[in-house]
Amino acid sequence: MATEDARDDGSATRWLGSGSSVLHEYLVDILGGLVPGILLTVGTAVSLVPPLLDVHRSLASALPGSTEPIVHVAGALGRIGSWPSTPLFFACVGVALMTYVAGHIFYRRDPKLPDQASFRLLERQKIVELLLRRRGAGRSGLLARTSRALRGSGYWLLVRLGEPRRLLGDAEGDHSALSDYLTKDLGAPSAERCEFPYPNFLDYLTKRGLDYLRPLVGWNQDTRSKLWVNILKVRLMLHHPQKCRQIVRNEAHIRLASGTWYVAGTLRRLALLGLGLVVAVVLASPRPVGSGWRIDWHLVASTLGQHFWTLLAPLVVLVVAWYLRRKIDGFYHYQRMREVDWVLETAFSAFRGTRTPLSPPFDPLTEQGFDRGGGERAPR
């Protein structure tokens, strides 16, 4: 009887744990789609609404009998405020749903492109580091540090504009160091081959002394496929769902960063469009009647002051979008590598010493499985 009660208590605990885990997954999924959607909606409004109002104002001033756009906006806001509470509520719900759907589309986009962009940034940083090490070998002091900083800025500009690896020249040592860094620290020989779960992940594990995880890596440079990692996740979900919370959280954070990366790219283009509209208004408005297409630059300068806030709105969105992409590029690839490492380590801890079909080609974990990596022999 006591045994049955204990078993019941254990099942209840597992049920409560799985229920809270499911609730957490739903919350993460909803927020993961909502945050990029809110960012997209607010960024689009700030980027385009002030420039479009400026364009409307410019057209209204050129057409007789037209009213200022602010009058139309105030009238529309007044009519919305006079709506009954029920239609207003449904209108707000509709906007929230459209925001969520738009954000969820970005949330579900392929994380391959931000991963490759992050890989390229890390590769360029390593090339600049190698160039500075070559130029500044054996030097120290304030002058040397200042010189390295200036050279670093120049190298970074050259790396951004041209082919990064050509800057290393014929220095075999630098090329070898770069190759080792890419394959053993970043998991791929180039950005073009940077695809999850990475063709050189075995080299990554070997460098860090994680040879016991090698039997779980069923892919190589020729058979790389995310199927291997997804199968490990499915087996863990089926047999040890209580150990998958951090894996789900890692994947949600990666999806959120990926969605934000895509939204930042879209906002960057929308901000450039808004800036283009403001510049067109500024260039077109100062032309006096009968001057043809000649531009009076003194009037342009004074008009810029009049359109300062309209110009500032898309410019702020452009800077924020650039900042977001820059920051995400700096950590995104490392987070993807961490995701693979976490899945492998969790699978090793959960299935060690069992006969669960896991190891490629998905046979039981006998001496062909964990034993090759130094794990315990599975029971026969």
Image (tube, rainbow, N blue to C red):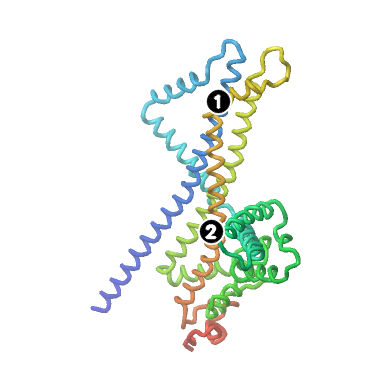
Q: Amino acid at mark 1?
A: Gly
Q: Camera-side residue: 290 or 39?
A: 290
Number of residues whose C-alpha sits closer than 10 Å to that of mark 2, classed few (under 14), some (14–19) or many (20 or more): some
Of all residues, the one furthest to the left in this rendering is 2
Q: Relative to 90, is 178 on the left or the right? A: right
Q: Relative to 287, is 36 on the left or the right? A: left
Rendered position, 156 above or below 281? below
Q: Camera-side residue: 109 or 124?
A: 124
Residue displayed at 56% across by 37% down = 315
Q: Secondary structure at mark 1?
A: helix
- Whether residue 194 is visible, yes or no, is no
Of all residues, the one furthest to the bottom in this rendering is 380
Q: Give the quadrant of the N terminus.
A: bottom left
- Where does the image place residue 130, in percent across and percent down from the top left? 64, 64
Q: Amino acid at mark 2?
A: Phe
Q: Relative to 90, is 170 on the left or the right? A: right
Residue underneath mark 2: 331
Foreground label between 2 and 1:
1
- Where does the image place residue 117, in percent across and percent down from the top left? 62, 55
Of all residues, the one furthest to the right in this rendering is 170
Q: Secondary structure at mark 2?
A: helix
Rendered position, 162 above or below 360? above
Q: Camera-side residue: 378 or 75?
A: 75
Residue displayed at 47% across by 61% down = 250
- Where does the image place residue 228, in percent across and percent down from the top left? 58, 70
* CB contact under 8 Å: marks 2 and 1: no
Residue underneath mark 1: 305
Residue displayed at 70% across by 58% down = 164
Distance between the Cα atoms at labels 2 and 1?
39 Å
Looking at the image, is mark 2 or mark 1 earlier in the sequence? 1
Of all residues, the one furthest to the top in this rendering is 65
Disc ID at residue 314? none
